[in-house]
Image (cartoon, grey):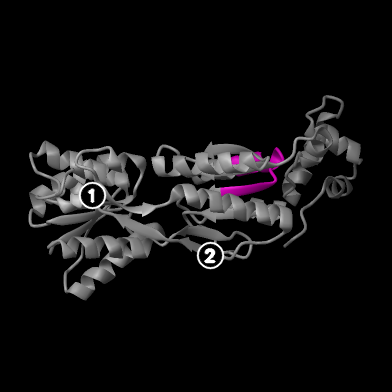
C-alpha cells in the first residue's frame, strides 16, 4: 500500500515549516492568504487528508469507527447499524453513523470527513457505483475497512467483503413455493443488472430450471411503492402468476397491499415470500414468509472481525457469506394462526 503523505511531506513540498501547515489546517489567520493557498494546493496535489488522530491521542479520544450506510430508511440496514454500534460501544469504541442515501458523491464526502476527524476504522455498505473515489481515499489513509452487504470495490485484499448467502436463500424460497404447488413463480423487485439483484435471483432461477418452470422477473426499485405497482402489473398483465419471491420485505409489503386493494387474498390467490425477515414480517397480516438473514448476529460478527483487525492485526478473509434460512408463514402457506 502506498505510504500516506504526512504533514512533514506537505511542508517540504510547499517549502514552508510544519508549524505553518498546522496553522493552515486550523484555519488560523496568522498565515498570509497566498501562503495558505499554496499549502492547500499542495495538500490537494499530494492527496493529503488531515487526520485528527494524533490530536485525539493526546486528548484521549480513542476508538472512533466510521459507519456509512447506503439507505438507513430501510429497517434491514437500520438494524445492522444499531447492533453494530452497540456491539462496538461495549468494546469501548464510539461509532459515527452516516446515511449516503445511494449518492456516490455524498458517500465520498462523508468518507473524507470521517478520515479527517480521525476514525480508527470504517465499515461501509456502499452506494451503487464503482466506489473508486470513496475507497481510494481509504486506501490512501490506510484504515482497516470492511465492505458489508454489497461489494463495490474489487480490492478484497484491502477491503474484505461480507454478506449473506442470498443465492441459497432464493433457492429455498423457490423450492418452498413449488412444493406447495406453485407453477408460475415470479421474482419481483431489484434493479436489473445489479450484482445484488443477480445474487438474490440466482438460486430462484436455478431452482425453477430444475423443475422445468420458466422464471418470470419484474424489476424495479426495492420499495413498498414499487411493490404496489408490481401487484397492479401482475394482476392486469400476468394473472396466471400464482406465487412470487420479492427482492426484499419492503417490496413484499407493497405487493400485499396491492393485492388487498384489488380484493385478492395473499396466501391463496398469490403465495408470497419476502427477503430479509425484518421484524414487521411477523406483525403484518397475513404474516409474511421470508428468507431470514440474521442481521443482529451478522453485525456482531462484523464488529468482532473489525476489532480483531484493529487490535490484533488479523485481516478478515476476503469474502465471507453468512448462512440464511427460510421462515414460512401464512403469506405462502395460507395457514393463519
Q: Is residue 47 above or below residue 169?
A: above
Asked if residue 177 lies in the magenta stretch, the reply is no
Which corner quadrant holds the C terminus?
A: top left
181 or 77, nearer to the observer: 181
Residue appearing at x 19%, y 38% in the figure:
257
Check whether the beta carbons of the residues at disc 1 and disc 2 lie within 8 A of each other: no
Q: Which residue is mark 1?
A: 329
Whether the magenta-drawn stretch holds residue 116 is answered as yes
Query: In the structure shown, which secondary structural element does the residue marked by tag 2 occupy?
Result: strand
Residue 120 visible to the viewer: yes
Alpha carbon separation for disc pair 1 and 2: 32 Å
Please provide percent x and percent y for residue 21. Answer: 84, 38
Circle on res. 279: none
Kindly indicate the quadrant of the structure image that contains residue 203: bottom left
Going 53% across and 40% down the picture, which residue do you hit? 106
Q: Mark 1, residues whose alpha carbon is within 10 Å: few (<14), some, or many (≥20)? A: many
Which residue, given by chain and number where applicable, does mark 2 sit on? 319
Q: Earlier in the sequence, mark 1 or mark 2?
A: 2
Q: Is residue 284 left or right of residue 193?
A: left
> Picture coordinates of residue 310 (x, y %)?
70, 53
Residue 192, compared with residue 71, is above or below; it is below
Residue 279 drawn at (x, y percent): 35, 41
Q: Residue at x 79, y 35 (%)?
A: 60
For the record, the magenta segment spans 109-123
Residue 61 at x, y percent in the picture? 75, 35
Q: Is residue 109 visible?
A: no
Amino acid at each position: 500500500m502506498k505510504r500516506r503523505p504526512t504533514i512533514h511531506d506537505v511542508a517540504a513540498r510547499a517549502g514552508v515549516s510544519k508549524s505553518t501547515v498546522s496553522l493552515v489546517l486550523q484555519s488560523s489567520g496568522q498565515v498570509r492568504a497566498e501562503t495558505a493557498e499554496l499549502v492547500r494546493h499542495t495538500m490537494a496535489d499530494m492527496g493529503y487528508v488531515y487526520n485528527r488522530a494524533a490530536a485525539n491521542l493526546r486528548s484521549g479520544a480513542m476508538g472512533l469507527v466510521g459507519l456509512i450506510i447506503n439507505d438507513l430508511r430501510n429497517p434491514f440496514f437500520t438494524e445492522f447499524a444499531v447492533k453494530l454500534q452497540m456491539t462496538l460501544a461495549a468494546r469501548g469504541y464510539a461509532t459515527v453513523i452516516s446515511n449516503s442515501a445511494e449518492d456516490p458523491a455524498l458517500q465520498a464526502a462523508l468518507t473524507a470527513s470521517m478520515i479527517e476527524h480521525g476514525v480508527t476504522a470504517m465499515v461501509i455498505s456502499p452506494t451503487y457505483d464503482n466506489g473508486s473515489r470513496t475507497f481510494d481515499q481509504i486506501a490512501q489513509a490506510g484504515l482497516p475497512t470492511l465492505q458489508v452487504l454489497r461489494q463495490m470495490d474489487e480490492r478484497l485484499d484491502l477491503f474484505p467483503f461480507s454478506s449473506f448467502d442470498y443465492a441459497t436463500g432464493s433457492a429455498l424460497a423457490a423450492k418452498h413455493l413449488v412444493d406447495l404447488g406453485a407453477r408460475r413463480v415470479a421474482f419481483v423487485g431489484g434493479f436489473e443488472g445489479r450484482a445484488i439483484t443477480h445474487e438474490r435471483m440466482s438460486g430462484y432461477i436455478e431452482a425453477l430450471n430444475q423443475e422445468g418452470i420458466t422464471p418470470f422477473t419484474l424489476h424495479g426499485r426495492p420499495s413498498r411503492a414499487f411493490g404496489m405497482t408490481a401487484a397492479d402489473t401482475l394482476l392486469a398483465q400476468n394473472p396466471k402468476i400464482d406465487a412470487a419471491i420479492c427482492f426484499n420485505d419492503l417490496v413484499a409489503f407493497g405487493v400485499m397491499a396491492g393485492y388487498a386493494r384489488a380484493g385478492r387474498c395473499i396466501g391463496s390467490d398469490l403465495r408470497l415470500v419476502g427477503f430479509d425477515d425484518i421484524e414487521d414480517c411477523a406483525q403484518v397480516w397475513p404474516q409474511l414468509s421470508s428468507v431470514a438473514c440474521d442481521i443482529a448476529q451478522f453485525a456482531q460478527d462484523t464488529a468482532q472481525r473489525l476489532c480483531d483487525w484493529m487490535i490484533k492485526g488479523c485481516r478478515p478473509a476476503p469474502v465471507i457469506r453468512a448462512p440464511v434460512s427460510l421462515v414460512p408463514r401464512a403469506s405462502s402457506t395460507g395457514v393463519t394462526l
